[in-house]
Amino acid sequence: MEHHLKILPSHFDAVSKGLKLAELRKNDRRFEAGDILQLCEWNGVYTGRHVSRIVTHVADVSEYLPDYVLLSMCGNFKGEGA
């Protein structure tokens, strides 16, 4: 499944450079390993920059933060839109 998600510029830059390899997200979409994250830079409006990543692992962190998961991600998918 492909998920289109907003991401703030400071986080977008780290993801696009390969420095940030995880996303903490509310699990309102039932994320699964193998899903595609289409991360679209958002600073109040969409900037037009985006990156795609593949979810490699979903860690349930609801014991610490109810209804949240930590998504490990890797690689590019469908190229870069930065």
Image: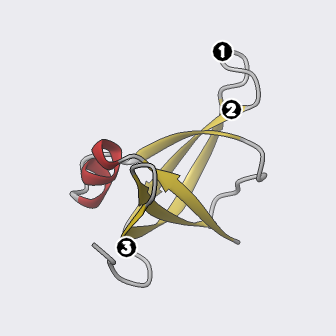
Query: Going from the N terminus, do you reach mark 3 or mark 1 first?
Result: 1
SS assignment at label 3? loop
Determine which of the numbered discs, if any, sits on residue 68 in the image. 2
Q: In which quarter of the image is residue 27?
A: top right
Q: Three-letter amino acid code at disc 1?
A: Tyr
- Looking at the image, do the residues carrying marks 1 and 2 touch, with CB atoms under 8 Å apart? no
* Residue toward you, 24 or 63: 24
- Looking at the image, do the residues carrying marks 2 and 3 touch, with CB atoms under 8 Å apart? no
Kindly identify the residue that appears in the image at 45 percent across and 63 percent down.
40
The residue indicated by pointer 3 is 76
Compared to residue 47, the image places residue 25 above or below, namely: above
Q: Where is residue 6 in the image (x, y as percent from the top left)?
A: 52, 54
Q: In this view, does 72 lie to the left or right of 62?
A: left
Count residues near mark 2 (Cα–Cα under 10 Å), then give few for <14, some for 14-19, many for 20+. Answer: some
Compared to residue 27, the image places residue 68 above or below, namely: above
Q: Position of residue 70 (x, y in %)?
A: 57, 38
Kindly identify the residue that appears in the image at 76 percent across and 30 percent down.
67
Q: Three-letter amino acid code at disc 2?
A: Tyr
In the orientation shown, which residue stands out farthest toward the left?
A: 17
Q: In which quarter of the image is the C terminus?
A: bottom left
The residue indicated by pointer 1 is 64
